[in-house]
Amino acid sequence: MAQIVYTGVADNAGVSGTLFQGAKFWFSRRVPSRSTFIEQVKANGGEVVSLETFADIKIVDHLKSDNAPGTYSYRYIERSIRNSVLEDLEDHRAGPARNSIRPAGAVGKPTKGTRTPFTAADDQVIYDLVDETERKGGATFGNEIYKQLGLI
């Protein structure tokens, strides 16, 4: 169902739409026309937060190659407002899915800069997985077993 959408309305006009009601947005500094998008979200019931961790939806420039996991294109806002209906958020994914595994040798995805040492509990989890896989007759060499561990 189409909703009433407001564009170009001053913050103090006393009217607001409900298209983005209850959603918290964070905008990357690299989003083109960032201030316009922020105004549009606010005019249509959305909340803009200053820290990524507090956002439900993280908006970035989809043309950049180094977008973080769980980020979405500013086109989500453009098209939702144009159509007066919320677009499917997954159609506007800009970065990889959250908790996705970075392929070995991936270009455009930075590697981690430091090594985090394993704890005794980490060692036990790895040992248990390898032991269980070995008992089931599975392969315990290569990266496949660690990819399985990453999905747990």
Image (spheres, helix red, strand yellow):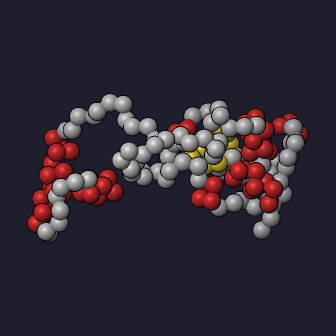
Q: Using the image, determine if residue 115 lies above or below residue 22.
A: above
- Above or below, 96 against 133 in this view is above
Kindly identify the residue that appears in the image at 85 percent across and 49 percent down: 6
Q: Residue at x 37, y 35 (%)?
A: 112
Q: Residue visible at 74% across and 56% down? A: 80
Residue 90 visible to the viewer: yes
Q: Residue drawn at (38%, 45%), measured in percent from left and top?
A: 105
Q: Is residue 26 visible?
A: no
- The image quadrant of residue 50 is top right
Figure quadrant of the C terminus = bottom left
Residue 116 at x, y = what percent?
Answer: 28, 34
- Image quadrant occupied by the N terminus: bottom right
Image mark count: 0
Quarter of the image where one finds residue 19: bottom right
Relative to 113, 62 lies left or right: right
Left or right: residue 116 compared with residue 89: left
In the rendered image, residue 54, in percent from the top left (x then y), is placed at 55, 40
Q: Is residue 66 left or right of residue 76?
A: left
Residue 28: image location, x then y, percent:
63, 36
Left/right placement of residue 134 relative to residue 115 reads left
Report the front residue among 63 and 91: 63
Query: Observer-nearest residue: 22 or 99?
Result: 99
Q: Position of residue 71 (x, y in %)?
A: 57, 47
